[in-house]
Image: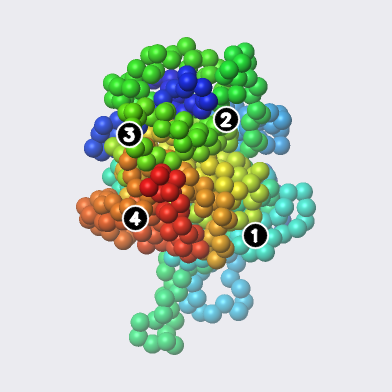
């Protein structure tokens, strides 16, 4: 059953609609509103399997798999109308590169693509057939800015092997073609690319002068070139009453009504006329609320201590232009949100905050079309200017099951700070946004940002399945998985985020 739901409505008057305090009462992840799965990862509707983009310099592979026609029937980028937001993905198989004359015998074979032309794209990544296989090596790309002859320097692509993914044995893995993948890298508007993948060469076990045995690269490696498409044009309000004309909202399918809290069920019944009206207007942003308005929105008992931070401003999926045809229609929910895992997207820092929606659309397409996930992996994203974005669909106030921290997706949420923060300090605005978001969302579920929580591992390279692990309520990705994420510099700022988040809750 599908229902129309206001997951958040910002108002400054006494007629404010309330927000749910908790998700459906369930002890394990559940799916609702079942529907068909997205198209195959190999091809999409209207796929052109002939390489017509030409080459630059060395001969390129003979085939290219790309979705030249987007799911909504839009034409390729060059022929789109100005209003068409649909993106596309070009998928190019990698092959052994030419052997240099000075190559040392026994040295690892390098795979990649020689310098070549491509249809315009803005984000790159490498995927392979086996989601459980690890890429032990380095991936580097060079790109050419669209319409120019300028090639970038070689850029490293983070080979974060399977640390962002749905838990093994979860519903998100069932019946899907999930692929292994590197982190995606934002390169800006480009129409030329070159890539090389070098496998690691471990030291010889017995003698240093013995030729090292190269570590095999995963099979079926492909370079994914993602065009995020154009941002959707803002929709003007249509006939809204004066007292609600500036009250945007976000709507999503909900779990079955019987599973909703009683206060929310009553709210939907009482406000159906308002819901329909605001739904027609559309919504790009959930506005911020004051502390008092936030407390009122969750319908606390008189005199109760809320320990909930003010709701921050959140750009909805509609606001950043998510194509809802890409994801699965059904949503996954867990019982609660006991902890927040902070990530960096590892997409690089060469983006402007105005480009952040394009970065999100690219990551979304890479997660679904290239990696085989059911939706955007993170529950929320934050850009370097401190803007907060709705990530995975299902309702910003709900305990939505994500695919952000392998082994610890249940009863947690994932927040990705857009950028790479291994050697770069995260902007203060981004850290502050993490504090605001966690103060509000964790507060809805009664979690103390400065506290500890015990989580049960679903299985990762750091904790075996079933192991109980005590963690900070606000943790970094590396706390649940052996990874560099969220980068050393961002990880060092989590203490500040915990303190600020708790203060915002009134603790």
Residue occupying the point 53% across, 60% down = 421
Q: Secondary structure at mark 4?
A: strand
Question: Contact (CB < 8 A) between labels 2 and 3?
Answer: no
Q: Looking at the image, is 446 positioned above or below residue 246? A: below
For marks 3 and 4, give the CA distance. 26 Å
Residue under label 4: 472
**Residue at image location 26% in from the left, 56% down from the top:** 469
Mark 4–mark 2 Cα distance, whole angstroms, equals 33 Å
The residue indicated by pointer 3 is: 304
Q: Nearer the viewer, residue 414 or 6?
A: 6
Looking at the image, can residue 74 be seen?
A: yes
Instruction: Say whether residue 342 is left or right of residue 462.
Output: right
Tell me the mark number nearer the camera, choosing from 2 and 1. Answer: 2
Of marks 3 and 4, which one's residue comes earlier in the chain? Answer: 3
**Mark 2 sits on what residue?**
284
Q: Earlier in the sequence, mark 1 or mark 4?
A: 1
The first of marks 4 and 2 along the sequence is 2
């Amino acid at each position: 059953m599908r229902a129309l739901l206001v997951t958040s409505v910002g108002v400054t008057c006494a007629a404010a609609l309330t927000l749910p305090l908790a998700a459906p009462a369930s002890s394990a992840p559940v799916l609702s509103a079942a529907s068909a799965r997205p198209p195959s990862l190999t091809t999409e509707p209207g796929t052109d399997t002939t390489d017509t983009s030409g080459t630059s310099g060395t001969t390129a592979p003979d085939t290219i798999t790309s979705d030249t026609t987007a799911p909504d029937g839009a034409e390729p980028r060059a022929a789109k109308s100005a209003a068409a937001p649909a993106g596309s993905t070009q998928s190019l198989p990698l092959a052994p590169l030419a052997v240099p004359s000075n190559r040392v015998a026994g040295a690892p074979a390098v795979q990649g693509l020689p310098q070549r032309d491509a249809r315009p794209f803005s984000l790159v990544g490498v995927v392979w057939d086996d989601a459980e296989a690890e890429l032990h090596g380095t991936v580097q790309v060079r790109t050419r800015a669209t319409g120019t002859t300028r090639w970038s320097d070689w850029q490293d692509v983070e080979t974060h092997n399977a640390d962002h993914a749905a838990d093994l044995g979860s519903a998100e893995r069932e019946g899907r073609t999930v692929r292994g993948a590197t982190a995606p890298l934002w390169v800006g508007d480009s129409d030329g690319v070159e890539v090389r993948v070098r496998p690691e060469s471990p030291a010889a076990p017995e003698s240093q002068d013995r030729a090292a045995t190269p570590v095999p690269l995963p099979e079926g490696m492909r370079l994914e070139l993602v065009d995020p498409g154009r941002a959707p044009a803002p929709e003007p309000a249509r006939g809204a009453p004066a007292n609600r004309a500036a009250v945007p909202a976000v709507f999503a399918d909900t779990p079955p009504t019987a599973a909703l809290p009683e206060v929310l069920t009553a709210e939907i019944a009482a406000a159906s006329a308002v819901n329909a009206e605001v739904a027609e207007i559309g919504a790009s942003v959930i506005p911020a609320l004051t502390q008092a308005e936030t407390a009122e929105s969750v319908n606390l008992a008189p005199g109760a201590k809320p320990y909930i931070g003010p709701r921050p401003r959140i750009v909805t999926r509609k606001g950043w232009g998510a194509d809802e045809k890409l994801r699965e229609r059904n949503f996954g929910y867990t019982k609660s949100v006991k902890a927040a895992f902070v990530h960096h997207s590892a997409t690089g820092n060469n983006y402007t905050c105005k480009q952040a929606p394009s970065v999100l659309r690219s990551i979304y397409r890479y997660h679904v079309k290239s990696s085989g996930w059911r939706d955007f992996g993170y529950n929320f994203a934050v850009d370097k200017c401190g803007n907060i974005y709705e990530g995975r669909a299902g309702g910003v106030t709900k305990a939505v099951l994500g695919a952000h921290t392998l082994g610890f997706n249940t009863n947690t949420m994932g927040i990705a700070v857009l950028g790479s923060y291994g050697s770069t300090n995260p902007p203060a605005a981004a850290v502050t946004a993490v504090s605001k978001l966690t103060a509000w969302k964790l507060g809805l579920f009664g979690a103390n940002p400065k506290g500890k929580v015990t989580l049960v591992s679903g299985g990762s390279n750091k904790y075996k399945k079933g192991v109980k692990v005590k963690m900070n309520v606000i943790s970094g990705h590396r706390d649940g998985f052996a990874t560099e994420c969220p980068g050393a510099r961002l990880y060092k700022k989590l203490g500040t985020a915990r303190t600020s988040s708790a203060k915002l809750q009134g603790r």
